[in-house]
Image (spheres, grey):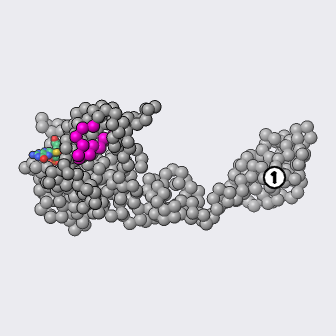
Amino acid sequence: MSDRPRPASIPDDLITVEDHLERILRGVGPLEPYDQPIVESLGLPLHEDYTAPIDLPRFANSAMDGYALRAEDVKGASESDPVVLPVVGEIHAGSAKPFAISAGTAVKIMTGAPIPKGADTVVPFERTDHGNSRVAIHHGPAEGAHVRPQGADVREGEVVLEAGTVLGAREIGLLASLGAGRVKARPRPRVVIISTGSELRDPGSQLDYDSIFDGNSYMLAAAVRAAGAIAYRVGAVEDTPRAFRQVLSEQLVRADLVVTSGGVSMGERDVVKETLSALGTVSFDKVAMQPGKPQGFGKVLDEQTPIITLPGNPVSAYVSFEVFVLPAIRRMMGRTPYRRPMVHAVLASDLESRSGVRQYVRAVFEVTHRGAKVTPISGDGSHLVGALSKANALIVVGEDETALNLGDTVRTLVLDRPF
Ligand SMILES: Nc1nc2c(c(=O)[nH]1)N[C@H]1C(S)=C(S)[C@@H](COP(=O)(O)OP(=O)(O)OC[C@H]3O[C@@H](n4cnc5c(N)ncnc54)[C@H](O)[C@@H]3O)O[C@H]1N2
Ligand code: MOO
């Protein structure tokens, strides 16, 4: 049970959002880390400190196309009084031949090529006559000009990325630059999504008079991917325990987590509840929230795979994903914080809420020159997917709060924002 005090207004037969979430988070553990190809690690937290095995730059090299030479040999050179040096060769990046020059000579050098032994400075072509066998240098540079020194960026032995760093393009680029093809991270959880309902048809197929398209499994698959996990979407399963049990047992081999939609309320064909209650390892509860009241969580079959059962109403399924599944996925991946941080915003209209439930109100969040503002979207039906698509935030109204007023500061979950 959560340590937080239970709001007094919650009816006895409901459990709190906090208790249900805590039960889920206790029931899903972080997945075992292993060495993964670096591009696959995008968005995953690094499991251990990463120490640079080499210097960067690995060798002193030229920052410009030009001539490598000794600054001392061209001291005081100018356009009107150039210093002419013999050109003893040409070095390209990757030509794999070590090179050395002696005093009073120059070598053509391209960007990225190693500075030859004996040289300390590069003069770009633009400050010369661009000569081939001899070159007139029109400028006396400071020693070290246009040379990128070895180890100036990263030192061998230095911890360049700390454990817990979430890997993005820049970090992956650094790892590759240091020669790491793989890196230790917890894997993306594989999440199997099963929608249930004999009325459901796949988008693009023919509808009967009482059938509807299966929006939820697509919405949930997209949400799973957006959370950084792998989604395996299973087409809608009809409302019979046999069909549901069969799909579940077939799917468990590839699941770290199963998420279902539908079939968990009080109906006579609530197949998820009926089938899983019989196993005795999944508990079904009414959670003091709106939308999203009927919820279930437990472990299934021999694999003891965690399963989160979401209500079928689309808005309820979406909000439940945000509140329960997203934190579970993040915990499995080792990403913290598990829960999306709340953002404070000023309410743009009055809002009424039912006592005894935590209300998640669809809303539009925007940052204006006056600060963060949030406007509720009208209509609170859990079937309103059109309205849901217009929202980019959920206002969280506490269990004991029944009215909020225009101008109040409210807590908001700003959806889709990385955290
Ligand atoms: N007597 C009671 N009835 C209901 C209660 C209750 O407490 N007592 N709770 C209501 C609440 S709240 C919710 S939420 C729903 C949850 O019901 P289920 O999880 O059993 O979901 P279904 O009955 O299967 O479907 C509900 C609704 O959503 C549509 N649906 C289902 N799956 C999909 C999908 N994949 N894509 C699009 N739409 C879907 C379905 O057709 C129904 O209209 O129960 C209330 N009833
Ligand atoms: O609580 Mo149900 O989940 O709103 O519509």
Q: Which residues are magenta?
A: 389-404
Image quarter of residue 114: bottom right
Res 314 visible: no
- Which amino acid, by three-letter code, is at mark 1? Glu
Front one among 34 and 157? 157
Q: Is residue 51 left or right of residue 388?
A: right
For disc 1, the marked residue is 143
In the rendered image, the quadrant that contains the N terminus is bottom left
Q: Residue furthest left?
A: 268
Please tell me which residue is depicted at 38% across the width and 49% down the height of the picture: 341
Please tell me which residue is depicted at 30% across the width and 48% down the height of the picture: 322
Identify the secondary structure beneath mark 1.
loop
- Looking at the picture, does residue 26 appear above or below residue 351? below
Image quarter of residue 199: top left
Front one among 212 and 318? 318
Q: Is residue 395 magenta?
A: yes
- Looking at the picture, does residue 141 appear above or below residue 365? below
Q: Is residue 275 magenta?
A: no
Please tell me which residue is depicted at 35% across the width and 52% down the height of the picture: 339
Q: Is residue 74 left or right of residue 308?
A: right
Number of disc labels: 1
Task: Find residue 254 and report its horizontal and vertical position in percent.
Answer: 30, 60
